[in-house]
């Protein structure tokens, strides 16, 4: 009876446009508990907010200092007992660590079993540790040391973002736009109901998200007439776009800002999903 009910729910979801049917492991990865999933979503939301702050301030030419920090250490991996949450990664084999992608890129150039020397700062003191890389659980050819890293920033002032009990990284673009709008005299929306989605990097690059169809439907029901859409989501967005919702392609924070200014009458072109 339970299996039949689940099947009927799935069939109804495939028919209805505002319901998404996805594999269970997409939401609850195998081997991870509900608590682990919730903690990961919370971490992604926190990182998204920091990246949005950094992107917005960088767009405004306000200096931001970046540091790479250990967010968590995985049990049974080389870094366990050697590095700990809060450590600042300052170098990889002597090369400066300027971002998470910089650190992971340097580590993944090696092979599992190769040594890598990590320079880190703990309690104001610089240290080094040499770790033997291990194969990643999902890809035996990819080396890891077993840490989750996060870009952390030193901002010249405090920015508070209140979003309630939600998680994940998909609000990054909209966070960045809201911060930019708050710190500039012009009104980016021009009185329009603007909605959108997309992850954001500290450099202002916009990335794709999941559930674009449902997000568009919810935005249109709430009254939105313009929806900022990550380029890699354009195909799916076009196939499910609700009537009355204009899709504006967003590749970067700067591009999204320029598009909104153009909607308000400034000269320029507005990229769309149709002409991607």
Image: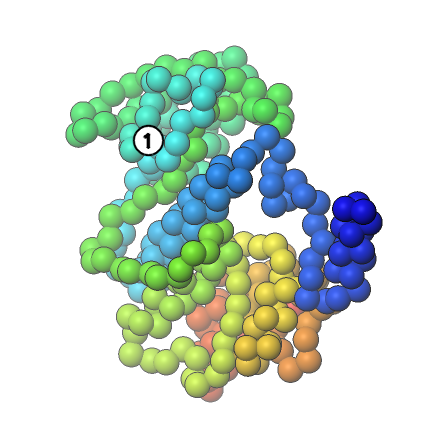
- Towards the viewer: 59 or 141: 141
Tell me if residue 212 comes above or below residue 101 in the rendering. Answer: below
Q: Is residue 127 left or right of residue 240?
A: left
The quadrant the C terminus occupies is bottom right
Q: Is residue 97 visible?
A: no
Q: Is residue 222 visible?
A: yes
Q: Is residue 271 left or right of residue 201?
A: right
Q: Position of residue 136 (x, y in %)?
A: 56, 24
Q: Position of residue 24 (x, y in %)?
A: 67, 43
The color scheme shown is: rainbow
Give the class, few, some or many, for how many residues have Cα within 10 Å of label 1's Cα (few <14, many ≥20): some
**Residue underneath mark 1:** 85
Q: Residue at x 44, y 17 (%)?
A: 78
Q: Position of residue 228 (x, y in %)?
A: 54, 69
Q: Residue at x 45, y 21 (%)?
A: 75
Which image quarter: residue 92? top left
Q: Secondary structure at mark 1?
A: loop
Q: Is residue 113 left or right of residue 102?
A: right
Q: Residue furthest left?
A: 124
Q: Residue at x 64, y 82 (%)?
A: 244
Tell me if residue 72 comes above or below residue 192 in the rendering. Answer: above
Tell me if residue 191 comes above or below residue 247 in the rendering. Answer: below
- Towards the viewer: 124 or 45: 45
């Amino acid at each position: 009876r339970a299996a039949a009910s689940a099947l009927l729910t799935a069939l109804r979801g495939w028919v209805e446009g505002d319901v998404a049917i996805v594999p269970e492991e997409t939401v609850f990865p195998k081997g991870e508990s509900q608590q682990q999933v919730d903690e990961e979503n919370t971490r992604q939301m926190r990182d998204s907010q920091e990246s949005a702050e950094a992107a917005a301030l960088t767009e405004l030419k306000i200096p931001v200092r970046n540091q790479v920090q250990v967010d968590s250490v995985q049990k049974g991996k080389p870094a366990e007992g050697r590095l700990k949450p809060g450590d600042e990664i300052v170098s990889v084999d002597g090369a400066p660590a300027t971002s998470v992608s910089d650190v992971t890129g340097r580590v993944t150039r090696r092979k599992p079993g190769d040594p890598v020397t990590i320079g880190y700062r703990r309690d104001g003191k610089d240290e080094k540790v040499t770790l033997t890389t291990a194969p990643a659980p999902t890809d035996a050819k990819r080396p890891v040391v077993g840490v989750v890293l996060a870009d952390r920033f030193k901002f010249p002032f405090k920015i508070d973002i209140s979003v309630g009990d939600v998680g994940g990284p998909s609000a990054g673009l909209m966070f960045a736009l809201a911060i930019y709008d708050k710190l500039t005299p012009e009104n980016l929306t021009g009185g329009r109901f603007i909605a959108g989605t997309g992850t954001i990097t500290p450099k202002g690059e916009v990335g794709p998200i999941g559930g674009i169809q449902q997000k568009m439907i919810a935005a249109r029901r709430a009254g939105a007439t313009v929806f900022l859409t990550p380029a890699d989501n354009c195909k799916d967005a076009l196939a499910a776009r609700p009537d009355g919702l204009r899709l504006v392609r967003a590749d970067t924070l700067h591009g999204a800002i320029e598009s909104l200014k153009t909607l308000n009458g400034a000269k320029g072109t507005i990229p769309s999903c149709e002409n991607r």
